Image (tube, helix red, strand yellow):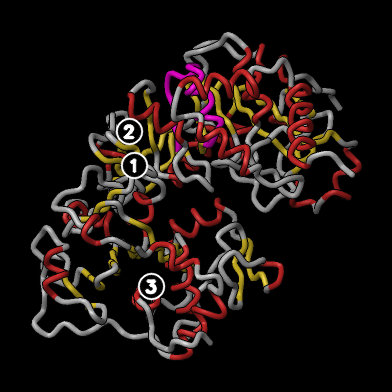
C-alpha cells in the first residue's frame, strides 16, 4: 500500500467511471484507454463481479489483470477478436467507455475532426466505432479536461446525442448514454428532456468551477452529492494490482 | 493442387490505374507491406483503397497513388493518428468514405457474399450518414417496418492480405491473436494475392497451429508470395512485433516533404523485398554495434 491513504483525482475519476458499470450484470465491459480500463477492472473486482473484460487485444480474461499484463498469466474465458467484439456490439450485451474531444448538452460527441468534416482543420481519430456503439448499447464518456471538451455545439457528430436519437423513434430503443465523467465531476442525462445534469462533484471542486468549464445550460440540482471517495480496498486494487506503474497519472496535468 | 507462387512485382503487374484495392490487416498489424511497396514501385495511380487502414493507406496517399479511401479507421495503433493520411484529409487531396468500424465489416461481408448490402442501425443519427450522401437506408419489408442503414458491398478488383504461413496452392494460416477480416477480403477480391512469412508444405500446417488457424482456403486466392518480414514495420505475431522505432521514423516524415522523399528513397523505392530485408539486417547490425 502506498503511504498516502488519501485518494488523488485520478483515483476519484476511476471510481466515478467504475460506478457507471453498477447494475450492468453480465455484459462485455469495453473501456478504451488506461483510466477507463482500470475502472472497468475495478468494478468487476468489487461490486459488479459478472462483467466480462478483455486484455484489450483478443482475449476475455478472468481475474485481476494489470494494465499491459500478459493474459497467459490469467484464465482466458473466451476468445474475443475484433469480429467477435462487433458481434457483441450488435447483440447489445456491451457497455463501452470512449473519449470525447467535444461533447454537448445532448451528449453529441465528436472525436472525428475539428472543422468541416469533408476538409477538416484537424483530423482526429475519425468516427471509429462510435456510430454503432451508441445506437446498440450503453455508452459512457471519459473526459479528462472538461473545460476543453464541453461545447455548445460539436463540429462532427461521431456519437449521436439524445436530440438526434429523438428523431429516430424505435430505431433508437437500445440507445443510452449512461454517464459522462470528467476531471471535475460526473454527469448523466436523467432529466425530462435528456439534457445533461450534474450528478456528483469531485471532492475539492466548487460548483463555480463546474459552471466556468461548461459553456451550455447544465442542470444543477440543489443537493448535488460529492463523488464517492475510493475505499481502502479500491485504492489497494488501483495502486498495487491494476496500475503499479502509475500509468493512470499521465492523463492528468 | 495448383501452384500459385509468384513475386510482389508480378502482383503489382496485375494492378491497373483506377482499380479498387482492398488491403487486409488492421491498423499497424499484419499489413501486406511488401506488396504495398511493389505498388509504389509501379506506375499505377488513381487507386481506390479499401482498408482498416494503417501505414498502407498513409504510404500510398503520401506517394500520390490514391484517388479515394474507404475505411473503418486509419491508425498506427501506438501512434493513434496516421500522420500521412491526416495530411491528406486536411489538405483535401483524397476523396473518402468513412464507415463505422463494424459497418465496414458488414460491407466486407456483403462483398464476400455477393449481396448488395447488409443492414444495420450503425450510422443513424451520426455524421456517417449525414455527411455521406452515397449511403442509403432501407425499410424492413417485415411488420416492424424499421429503417436501417444499407451498408453497400465493398467490392474490390484486387485484395491483398498477409499471413504467417501459406502453401503453394494458396491456403493461408494466421498464427497471431486475430485473423482480423482477411478471410472476407480474400473472398471480396475479384483477384486476391496473399503474401506469407513462409511457404510450407501443406502437411506441415497442423504442426504450426490448430485447425482453427487455417482460415484462408485456396478457393479465394489467386497468387502466393513468400515474404519473410513482409509485414514489417507492422506487427506480425508470433513471427515478430511491430518495429516501433521504425514506425516513429516513418511517422516523423509527415512533417516535411524532404524527410518523406528521403525516407521513400531509402526504404520504399528499393528494387525488391529482398533488398528491403537486406537493409533491415544492416540497420539491425548497426544498432547493435560490432559484436565483441
The front one of A224 and A89 is A224
Instruction: Locate residue B180: give its quadrant.
Output: top right
**Residue displayed at 84% across by 39% down:** B290
Q: Position of residue A134 (x, y in %)?
A: 33, 56
Q: Which residue shows up at 56% across the image and 74% down it? A: A244
Give how far across and how far down residue B16 sits, in percent.
57, 11
Q: Which residues are magenta?
A: B54-71
Q: Are marks 1 and 2 in contact (CB under 8 Å)?
A: yes
Residue in front for this viewpoint, A122 or A18: A122
Q: CA distance from mark 1 to mark 2?
A: 8 Å
| Label of residue A251 in the image | none
Image mark 1: chain = B
Q: Residue at x 34, y 75 (%)?
A: A9
Where in the figure is residue A61, as x and y percent of width and height? 61, 70
Label 2 sits on residue = B135
- Label 2 element class: loop
Residue named by callout 3:
A10
Q: Which residue is mark 1?
A: B149
Residue B24 visible in this rendered orientation of the protein? yes
Amino acid at each position: 500500500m502506498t503511504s498516502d491513504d488519501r485518494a488523488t483525482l485520478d483515483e476519484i475519476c476511476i471510481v466515478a467511471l467504475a460506478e457507471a458499470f453498477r447494475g450492468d450484470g453480465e455484459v462485455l465491459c469495453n473501456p478504451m484507454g488506461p483510466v477507463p480500463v482500470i475502472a472497468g477492472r475495478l468494478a468487476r473486482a468489487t461490486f459488479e463481479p459478472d462483467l466480462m473484460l478483455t486484455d484489450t487485444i483478443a482475449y476475455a480474461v478472468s481475474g485481476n489483470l494489470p494494465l499491459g499484463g500478459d493474459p497467459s498469466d490469467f484464465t482466458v474465458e473466451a476468445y474475443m477478436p475484433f469480429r467477435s467484439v462487433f458481434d457483441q456490439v450488435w447483440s447489445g450485451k456491451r457497455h463501452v467507455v470512449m473519449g470525447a474531444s467535444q461533447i454537448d448538452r445532448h451528449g453529441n460527441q465528436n472525436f472525428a475532426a475539428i472543422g468541416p468534416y469533408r476538409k477538416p482543420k484537424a483530423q482526429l481519430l475519425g468516427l471509429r466505432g462510435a456510430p454503432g456503439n451508441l445506437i446498440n448499447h450503453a455508452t459512457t464518456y471519459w473526459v479528462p479536461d472538461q473545460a476543453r471538451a464541453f461545447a455548445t455545439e460539436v463540429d462532427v457528430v461521431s456519437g449521436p446525442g439524445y436530440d438526434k436519437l429523438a428523431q429516430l423513434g424505435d430505431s433508437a430503443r437500445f440507445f443510452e448514454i449512461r454517464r459522462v465523467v470528467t476531471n471535475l465531476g460526473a454527469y448523466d442525462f436523467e432529466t425530462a428532456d435528456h439534457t445533461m445534469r450534474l450528478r456528483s462533484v469531485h471532492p475539492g471542486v466548487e460548483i463555480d468551477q463546474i459552471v466556468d468549464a461548461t459553456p451550455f445550460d447544465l442542470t444543477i440540482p440543489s443537493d448535488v452529492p460529492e463523488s464517492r471517495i475510493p475505499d481502502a480496498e479500491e485504492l489497494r486494487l488501483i495502486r498495487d494490482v491494476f496500475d503499479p506503474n502509475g500509468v493512470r497519472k499521465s492523463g492528468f496535468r | 493442387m495448383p501452384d500459385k507462387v509468384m513475386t510482389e512485382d508480378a502482383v503489382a503487374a496485375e494492378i491497373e490505374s483506377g482499380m479498387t484495392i482492398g488491403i487486409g490487416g488492421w491498423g499497424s498489424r499484419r499489413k501486406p507491406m511488401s506488396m504495398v511497396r511493389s505498388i509504389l514501385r509501379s506506375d499505377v495511380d488513381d487507386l481506390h483503397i479499401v482498408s482498416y487502414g494503417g501505414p498502407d493507406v498513409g504510404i500510398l496517399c503520401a506517394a500520390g497513388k490514391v484517388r479515394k479511401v474507404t475505411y473503418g479507421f486509419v491508425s498506427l495503433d501506438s501512434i493513434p493518428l496516421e500522420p500521412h493520411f491526416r495530411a491528406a484529409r486536411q489538405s483535401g487531396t483524397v476523396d473518402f468514405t468513412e464507415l463505422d468500424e463494424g459497418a465496414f465489416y458488414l460491407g466486407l461481408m456483403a462483398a464476400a457474399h455477393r449481396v448488395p448490402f447488409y443492414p444495420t442501425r450503425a450510422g443513424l443519427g451520426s455524421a456517417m450518414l449525414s455527411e455521406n450522401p452515397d449511403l442509403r437506408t432501407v425499410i424492413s419489408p417485415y411488420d416492424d417496418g424499421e429503417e436501417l442503414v444499407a451498408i453497400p458491398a465493398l467490392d474490390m478488383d484486387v485484395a491483398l492480405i498477409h499471413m504467417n504461413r501459406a502453401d503453394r496452392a494458396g491456403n493461408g494460416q494466421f498464427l497471431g491473436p486475430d485473423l482480423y477480416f482477411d478471410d472476407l477480403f480474400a473472398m471480396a477480391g475479384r483477384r486476391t494475392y496473399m503474401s506469407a512469412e513462409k511457404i510450407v508444405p501443406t502437411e506441415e500446417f497442423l504442426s504450426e497451429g490448430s485447425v482453427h488457424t487455417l482460415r484462408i482456403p485456396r478457393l479465394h486466392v489467386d497468387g502466393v508470395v513468400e515474404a519473410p518480414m513482409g509485414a514489417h514495420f507492422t506487427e506480425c505475431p508470433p513471427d515478430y512485433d511491430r518495429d516501433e522505432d521504425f514506425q516513429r521514423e516513418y511517422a516523423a516524415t509527415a512533417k516535411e516533404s524532404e524527410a518523406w522523399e528521403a525516407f521513400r528513397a531509402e526504404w520504399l523505392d528499393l528494387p525488391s523485398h529482398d533488398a528491403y530485408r537486406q537493409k533491415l539486417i544492416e540497420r539491425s547490425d548497426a544498432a547493435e554495434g560490432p559484436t565483441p
